[in-house]
Amino acid sequence: MADAANHAKIVDTTGGAPTAPDEAPDGAAGADGSDSAGIPGDADEGVEEGHGGGGGHGTRAVIAALFANMAVAAAKFVGFAFTHSSSMLAEAVHSVADSGNQGLLLLGGRKARKAADEEHPFGYGRERYFWGFVVALVLFTLGALFACYEGLHKIEHPEPVKSPAWALGILGFALVAEAFSFRTAVTEANRLRGDASMWQFIRRAKSPELPVVLLEDTAALLGLVLAFAGVTAATVLDDGIWDGYGTLSIGILLGFVAIVLVVEMKSLLIGESASRKEMEAIRAAVEIEPDVIRIIHLRAEHIGPEELLVGIKVEFLHELTVVDVSATIDRVERNIRGGVPTARIIYIEPDVHRDHYGQATYVAEHEGHIDPSDPDYEAITGLHKPVDLDDEIWS
């Protein structure tokens, strides 16, 4: 069966579509006929997502932030009860929202571990992106909008801050607790970001938990500074309007952070490509195989923080048989998974590059024959019977 690889489209050699990440196919047919070369993903250098980018899903940082926010929220509500400071109330609600957000992140990590099934054959990895998106919405609605409303209300109807010593003491405690949570998140991020800056890590990381915690903790620390400034100004100047200004500033800050999170989570939900480093590793793993002529088309997309869906159109040596091509695909997949462990589901389609179309051997199209004398000739072909000039009627 020489030259069979020129014509055959090798489909999933496992006999069907994958039902779980651990049951990735040995090869599969591609969907399009593009002859263009694959375009690597956007630069992701420095963010070592390919080697444990989830880092345990950032669970340690999430749990640290959860306990810190619960303690801080309780303290801030006590402070509000004594001081009636709108800045203190806004910060208390902010901490409650953050506590709920950490709970949602943990829920997303748990749901993402569900095994793939018929309804979701590629698994539930994107659950973590969805709940990260919900976190951004909660931060905006429960945190930013409430703080803005409360701040505008206090600016229109200013009230003096009662017992400012209580407010400043509780804000100091909150700063210490939030700093502990922030330090834990930074330590976890430093293990993963490589040479990337912290902002690059937040923008490029495929695991949503650490970027969310980093942004929330940064907003919390800045919000506490704003609340501290508002309470201090209101006390020193004996004008409660400054407390309102501090509250409004907290709301604007939270709104900005929420918008950044919405944009990043939206991008992950839609589907982001593999990093440039991972794309280069996949390409190298394919091209090192001696039976491969070239890669015609390559795409790799994250279907979860630690899961890649890879589709490749490859031109193999033309003299290979179908069995040879199947064996080569198996070797290529092992190469890919060895270099990029996150490549859990791989589809490979043998094809012929357009430069070789003229050299390829094709089977001529079969033309059937129907005897014109067949009484059903017209019904079958839709044509009239040809005129026979030797017929007696013409003599």
Image (cartoon, rainbow, N blue to C red):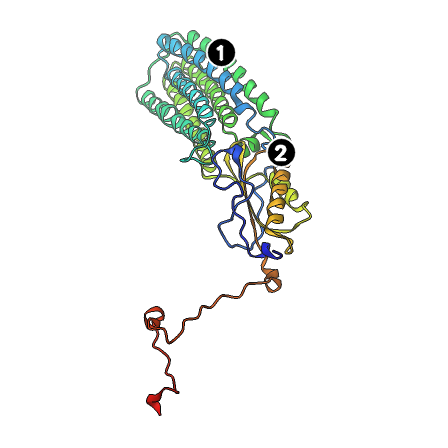
Q: Does 218 sit left or right of 390 as displayed?
A: right
Residue 300 appearing in the image: no
What is the crowding at mark 2: few (fewer than 14 residues within 10 Å), some, or many (at least 20)? some
Residue 172's tag is 1
User: Mark 2 — residue?
Assistant: 46
Along the viewing direction, whichever of 335 and 7 lies nearer the viewer: 7
Q: CA distance from mark 1 to mark 2?
A: 36 Å
Along the viewing direction, whichever of 368 and 307 lies nearer the viewer: 368
Q: Does 45 sit left or right of 249 as displayed?
A: right
Along the viewing direction, whichever of 279 and 385 lies nearer the viewer: 385
Instruction: Relative to 369, say whether 291 is above or below.
Output: above
State which quadrant residue 145 falls in: top left
Expressed as whole percent of the image width and height from the top left, the position of residue 55 reads 57, 25
Quarter of the figure that contains the N terminus: bottom right
Which is more foreground, mark 1 or mark 2? 2
Q: Does 71 sit left or right of 187 as displayed?
A: left
| Amino acid type of the residue that numbered disc 1 sits on in the rendered structure | Gly
Instruction: Relative to 383, say whether 95 is above or below.
Output: above
Which residue does the image show at 52% across and 44% down from the upper left? 12
Quarter of the figure that contains the C terminus: bottom left
Query: Secondary structure under badge 2?
Result: loop
Residue 346's tag is none
State which quadrant residue 136 falls in: top left
Query: Secondary structure under badge 1?
Result: helix
Q: Does 376 sit left or right of 362 as displayed?
A: left
Expressed as whole percent of the image width and height from the top left, the position of residue 246 reads 41, 21
Expressed as whole percent of the image width and height from the top left, the position of residue 232 reads 44, 14
